[in-house]
Amino acid sequence: MNKLVGEALVVKDLKTQFFIYDGVVKALEDVSFILKKGEVLGIVGETGCGKSVTAYSIMRLIPDPPGRIISGQIKMGDYDLIKGMDQEVDIILKKRPKIRHHNKMIKKNEYLYNKIRGRYISMIFQEPMAALNPVFTVEDQIVESLYLHSKTKILRVIKSASEHISDLQSFKDKGGITSELSGEVGVELQKIKIQKKGFESEGKHLEMLIDEATKYLAKKNKYDEMLKESIEVDSLEDSLFGNIGEEERARILKVLSKEAKKSHLTRLTKRLKKRNPDPVISEARREAFGLLESVNIPNAFQILKNYPHELSGGMLQRVVIAIALSNDPQILIADEPTTALDVTIQAQILELLRDLRKNRGTSIILITHDLGVIAEMCDRVAVMYAGNVVETAPAIELFHNPKHPYTIGLLQSIPRIDDPTKKLNIIRGTVPNLIKPPTGCRFNPRCQFAFDKCTVEIPPTIETSEGHTVACHLFSGKEVR
Amino acid sequence: MSEILLKGIGIRKYFPIRGGVSGRTLGYVHAVDDVNITIYKGETIGVVGESGCGKTTLGRVVLDLIDPTTGALFYKPNESEMSQLEQLYSELTSGGARELKKEEKKILNTTKDNIYKSRRKKKDFRSRVQIVFQDPVSSLDPRMLIKDVIFEPIKINGIPVEGEDDNGKQKRVRLRGDAATKYILDIVTEMGLNEDHLFRFPHEFSGGQRQRIAIARAIAVKPEFIVLDEPTSALDVSVQAQILSLLKNLQQKYNVAYMFITHNLAVIRAVSTRVIVMYLGKIVEEALTDELFEYPIHPYTQALISAIPVPDPNFKRSRIVLSGDVPSPANPPSGCRFHTRCRFAKEICSTEEPKLKEIRTGHVVACHFAEDILKTESERTGIKKISEIAI
Amino acid sequence: MTTESAGSEFSRALKKRLESSKRSFYFLTRSPLATIGLAVVIFYVILAIIGPKLVGGNPSVMTAYPIYHGQPIIFNPLPPFEYAKFPLGTTIGGYSIYEGVLKGARVDLELASIIVFSGALIGTVLGSVAGYKGGAIGEAIMRGTDIFLSLPYIVLAVAFLTVFGRYESVMIESLILIWWPTYTRIVRGQVLSVREQKYVEASVAAGSSSLRTVIKHIIPNSIYPIFVQISLDFGNVILTLASLFYLGFTFAGPGFAEWGNLLSRATSAGTGGAALESYPWAVTIPGLVILIFVLALNLFGDGLRDVLDPRMRR
Ligand SMILES: Nc1ncnc2c1ncn2[C@@H]1O[C@H](COP(=O)(O)OP(=O)(O)OP(=O)(O)O)[C@@H](O)[C@H]1O
Ligand SMILES: Nc1ncnc2c1ncn2[C@@H]1O[C@H](COP(=O)(O)OP(=O)(O)OP(=O)(O)O)[C@@H](O)[C@H]1O
Ligand code: SF4
Ligand SMILES: [Mg+2]
Ligand SMILES: [Mg+2]
């Protein structure tokens, strides 16, 4: 699935609203954009323009009440996440019709969506502390995520390690990895090598791998059974995104939600059996160690044992990124990952995200209000204003040939470190109240080019050149929507 | 340069860290450690540095909102007295930075005219300076109408009129009733708000509007000096631009001096005339703005400048990514505080603390290798040089 | 702004405040239990205002009817709903329960108001000082608070009444003495957090004196949680008063219209157990009156807490 062509995610006509005391907040109004495979898409816009709501809608994390996705599509492959979830809710309701009116209960029962969230799409939040559970160590939290979503991979590595156990032993005795190994374990060791860690860390990994391989050999049958099951589940999940009929999809959903529930239960019981830990868990520990190293955390073994509050902001954000990466998601949504951090730490984190895209080919949605970060990181940019996507373009095109008056104003209002004489241009006024948004183009009260049509008619989205779309009456051309 | 408005000498602020059941003092956070600062009339002095480096604390000490551990602050000092003091001070600290002895502290603290020590001066000083905070949400009392928020400083201090009284104090009049309402209305209109806004509560405003209110409140008493503690950090760029230009206009009109605290170097570049770079409670570099950006010398300043994302995808440059986190100010590294993250660090850096030296005219740097770096490196990292390389 | 518009300043400010209380009221009414609580509390307050007028006579003393229609009812209470003159029956001593309940509402609410509001006032002042000034004074205040909080309050009140004599003033003062520490603690906690708010520093920077800062900024912003406590404490004070009167620590005669006193009439002649069997209404009716009021106050207090807690506002 990881080929670098085509679309990783298609969001179409997404409409999300919040129903509160003062009225209905029309937070998203027909938001559409495409995330291509392997690219970094920037979403930029001012406070309250709906960037986070977009991210939450994709993750289906909109608090309900008061929020609700009214309509729209969020498609991965041929699978519509919104419809898929509604299908699952139907399945749950069929089994337990009484919980119809309890949103929270339904949410708790959404096993499948919880699985998809971790395995296919991950999210990094602005506040790293909020994404971590304060009562568990960093290790526990990474292991939990791995156990939930990466069982197959972990079991494969153990199996492969057991096949090469004698080689591993000799590497360890000789001190370091000298030649290439085949199989999953080879890939795993290669990864460690790429990260250019000293021998100490390699030795630690080897030691742990050998440990698990021995355990595996002792209980070979049981492990193989687990692996088989887990591969089945994975392939079922993957097939959801393919081009299959509605009925077939519903059937798969049913099987999966049963499966997901089972694994939820086993996980609970495993937790209780501390004395005889699940082998997958101990391999997950090793993996967690590797993950922290891969996000450049020095002294990773120590950090694993820490609780979130014991870490600094930059460190925490790296831990959160490690968790988000733990299952090699195809899509990573980063909602202002560096806003709470210092510039020098921000530079470190951005470097990390850049490497990530290069090494793993993850598609990233980077949400920020810093156009500088966008310029450094993104291939394509979507500019949002008051719940609308007003312009999308390749990054270079956007910065050198902005079309929408809002984008132009935004670009002119940033002080430039490289050009102190630049006169700051001001967009007058403020972001409108989304309970009573302006009619027509939502930007019209602040727009210096607005004319009568702008206040009455919603501008269509127009493609002005290849890959450059803009929603403004000043432009004419092929309508995309 | 123009007249000196404010001069702080040897300012230190150590916050005790208390712990345990008994609340014993376990150590000190060295929030501001031995800083000299001069503020000239009508200028904008920028203070940059990472979170926790003591920017806010410095601002609060300079406004006498908190008592410093040591140090003296003078308002419009008289030149001859000043040079004498500086002499004394440099003698006191000549043995490298250290904790002052009791008698030495005494000398510094009891100097005549030190604002920290003179009640009478304090009160007058208060009415001449103001502060605007970063967080527009918590800096306005949520239970007060905007008109009361803006009126508060006027009610306490009155507004200045021409001339000074016998004690060198400003003459001030108190406004009441209609005169007051009219005065407030004028100020508010100047800020781009209107009469209706006066009868609302702070929570009914957006961040930018609240920041305007905070500025209106500060400017209302016609101060000579305002500390702006990250006034735009919580705002959107479009609103930031509005606030920055508002501040600029006010400065021209009232000839007020700003101390502009921020961690955004681009903003500093746009607004300030002089810049102070702080790291862990110390000033590491100080220069006029253009000088600093063209010849950044301290390795930390260089890293800071290169870490700022520039909104132009074609802008290429050598990136200096600092490794590691900012160390805790409770336990600052020995020697040069930056040596744990510095690319140039050598043995001497971890043992000996570098003093501020003038490297180019008006450009002071605290680094053992400042001269070498100036020769070899600033060519590469100066912002003008970079943008010339840009495609 | 001209003079006319300045004249309307007050009304505009008032309108603003009304709007925000309307909003609070809306949130309160979203909880049915709190609404019921509020309704019941209002009903009791109305009773306290007009009740004594309805029955006439001395508003704080019940009239004794030892003999009714030639029958001595002093030790044979009449049941409720049988005689128009005694709609809720009578109790030992020939007191009308109806009259006792109505007059008691006034007496109890009055006493409770004095005690709770004085306690709240003292607590607020001490709490603000302890929170804002801190240091040795704050420490001393808080240790004092701890001592008072650790004393069993009925015992303390009984001790006071025994030592200083049974006077109304002693009872009120001893209860005030018991009630301030809770407020001190709440207010201090609030002040500690409000003190760190930027607007407090901004006001200091504007030259405001400590006293002015405390009065203008800190107290108005720390006071809301004590309204919740006041509403809950009203119930507690009334219960305590009733207990004291029931236990016989009174400062007035047997006819004093206080709910606890009324309740104690039924069991006063050494007929504790027998009272419930032979004239249950004399125990249950005053008991219920107290129970409903305290319950309503608690429901209302919980609702109020939710309204004042912004996190609950959705
Ligand atoms: N839980 C909620 N209840 C009511 N309204 C909400 C809620 N969450 C978001 N909104 C509204 O939706 C709109 C978009 O909010 P969103 O958080 O997406 O903005 P954003 O672009 O992420 O801004 P920021 O840069 O501040 O993070 C806002 O007007 C906001 O008030
Ligand atoms: N009242 C206080 N009590 C104890 N420590 C304090 C206090 N105020 C500040 N500090 C500490 O002093 C150091 C400097 O704080 P300061 O707020 O001046 O930093 P800053 O440069 O303004 O940072 P930021 O950019 O995050 O605002 C920090 O480590 C902080 O924890
Ligand atoms: S549609 Fe009209 S109002 Fe909107 S941005 Fe274009 S010109 Fe401005
Ligand atoms: Mg957001
Ligand atoms: Mg600060």
Image (cartoon, rainbow, N blue to C red):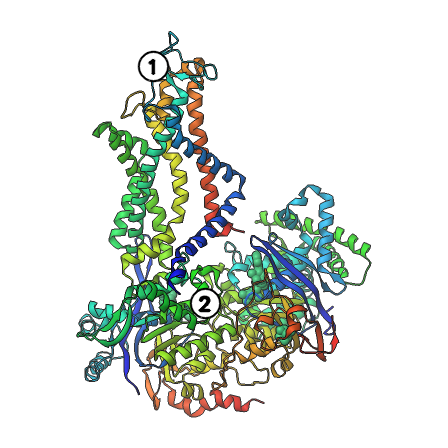
Identify which residue is drawn at 30% across, 60% down. B25
Q: Position of residue C37 (x, y in %)?
A: 48, 37
Q: Position of residue B5 (x, y in %)?
A: 28, 79
Residue underneath mark 2: B194
Circles 1 and 2 in contact, beta carbons < 8 Å: no
Q: For disc 2, does the CB lie below 8 Å from ligand 1?
A: no
Q: Position of residue C306 (x, y in %)?
A: 48, 46
Point out which mark residue A40 bears. Answer: none
Amino acid identity at mark 1: Ala
Identify which residue is drawn at 34% across, 46% down. C185
Point out which mark residue C269 bears. Answer: 1
Q: Secondary structure at mark 1?
A: loop
Looking at the image, the residue that sits furthest to the bottom is B375
Identify which residue is drawn at 51% across, 51% down. C313
Between B247 and A264, which is closer to the camera in this rendering?
B247
Q: Is residue A29 above or below residue A448?
A: above
Q: Quadrant of the C terminus of chain B?
A: bottom right
Between A229 and C52, which is closer to the camera in this rendering?
C52
Q: Quadrant of the N terminus of chain B?
A: bottom left
Q: Count residues near mark 1 (Cα–Cα under 10 Å), then give few for <14, some for 14-19, many for 20+.
A: few
Looking at the image, the residue that sits furthest to the top is C70
Between C86 and B313, which is closer to the camera in this rendering?
C86
Q: Secondary structure at mark 2?
A: loop
Ligand 3 positioned in quadrant: bottom right
Q: Count residues near mark 2 (Cα–Cα under 10 Å), then give few for <14, some for 14-19, many for 20+.
A: few
Q: Position of residue A246 (x, y in %)?
A: 80, 56
Amino acid identity at mark 2: Asn
In the image, taking residue C20 as reference, residue A100 lies left or right, namely right
In the image, taking residue B171 as reference, residue A383 lies left or right, namely right
Res. B31 in view: no
Q: How far apart in space, not on screen, are marks 1 and 2 (Cα)?
A: 74 Å
Q: Is residue B133 above or below residue C31?
A: below
